[in-house]
Amino acid sequence: MLTLDMVREAQEALQGIARRTPLDPAPRLGENIYIKAENLQLTGAFKLRGAYNKIRSLTPEEAKRGVVACSAGNHAQGIALSASRLGIKSVICMPAGAPISKVEATRSYGAEVVLVPGVYDDAAAEAERLVREEGYTFAHPFNDPLVIAGQGTIGLEILEQLPDVEQIVVPIGGGGLISGIAFVVKSLKPECRIVGVQAAGAASMYLSRHAGGPTELRSVATIADGIAVKKPGDLTFALCQQYVDEIVTVSEDEIASAILALMEVQKTVAEGAGATSVAAVMFGKVDVSSRKTVCVVSGGNVDVTTLSRIITKGLSKAGRIAEITTKVVDKPGSLLQMLKVVADSGANILSIAHSREDRHSDVGACMVSMVLETRDTAHVEKIRQDLTALGYHLEE
């Protein structure tokens, strides 16, 4: 049973452990938009709050046996750090595809890491086996009242930092974060709207809501690995049904664009899961025209190589990077004429490939592919129109 007293007790216990993260306006994202930056939390994500609240509540006997948890990375780091602070052994089962940065960070906090083939739910099955066979206490990442109470402290902070908040947009994986925030905010300020956001490729809570009960997906696929959960918990589902006003989904391109916008506009790094709330606002999935809206950026633990790919995808989506491929007559000056169009447009050539042997090229012609740095989609379209007007046949 979740109560406000549990959340307030968690807030007291977390003093000196978890940071009170900033809540800042984001005027370039929207007039009424604010960012609750849990990506600046110790361990880089909100999960520390619920993890510590769970670990501190273990009985002496449970603490002696140790804890096991399953996580894509953020809960893992929260449990590992909390257990280390309290002198308790921790074993973390992580999906084998979890970002290397999260795996290494979890180890650095003192946990034993077990990599399990598959996704979160496969790691959960291995954790359950260790509970049965080794006697560990299982620290569930979301379907636990103590964990939810810890995450609910974010709701208390938002109400303290922005008392006139009218809407809060929250990422959803298994539902622990939004359950805690929604329970607290609806209990203290029921008129405030709570909107959940899921990646379209891992929309288990969204589909469960429409199905009327927790529904398991056959598979999940998203760059937002922190919310790639096949099935929500029964407790989190019930809390979402009672306290969450709406759940929306965002695409991979929209998530990538939001990560890029947070970097450029807010000067902050968010992982895919953390950026979903901003993506929902940026692409009109949530009405923010007349409401003071807080977007919870839940984490920033993104692998550098993954971030590089996401930035490239975001730039491409925004028309800031474009690839143009066309046939060019294989004679002196032909390539120069094409490059002059690009130069005159103000675009910058990042790379160019020139091939006579391409199977799509005719005898006496060659294929040229350029990657350009451009201003926006209108700029890209103008370059394509100018090249087409000169007789170049561009590939789509």
Image (cartoon, helix red, strand yellow):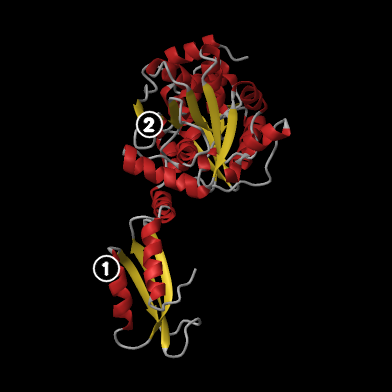
Among the 4 quarters of the image, the one containing residue 40: top left
- Mark 1 lies on residue: 344
Residue 15 percent location from the top left of the image: 38, 16
First-in-chain label (2 vs 1): 2
Front residue of 44/132: it is 44
Residue 308 percent location from the top left of the image: 39, 52
Residue drawn 37% across the image and 21% down it: 20
Mark seen at residue 194:
none
Front residue of 152/282: it is 282
Task: Name, please, the residue furthest toward the right.
Answer: 212
- Mark 2 lies on residue: 31
Residue drawn 41% across the image and 52% down it: 318
Residue 2 percent location from the top left of the image: 59, 15
Label 1 amino acid? Asp
Q: Is residue 228 left or right of residue 159?
A: right
Residue 127 percent location from the top left of the image: 61, 35
Q: Is residue 267 left or right of residue 206?
A: left
Residue drawn 49% across the image and 25% down it: 167
Label 2 amino acid? Glu
Q: Secondary structure at mark 2?
A: loop
- Label 2 close to label 1 by CB (< 8 Å): no
Marks counted in the figure total 2
Q: Secondary structure at mark 1?
A: helix
Q: Is residue 3 left or right of residue 100?
A: right
Front residue of 66/162: it is 162
Task: Name, please, the residue furthest toward the front.
Answer: 389
Front residue of 7/378: it is 378
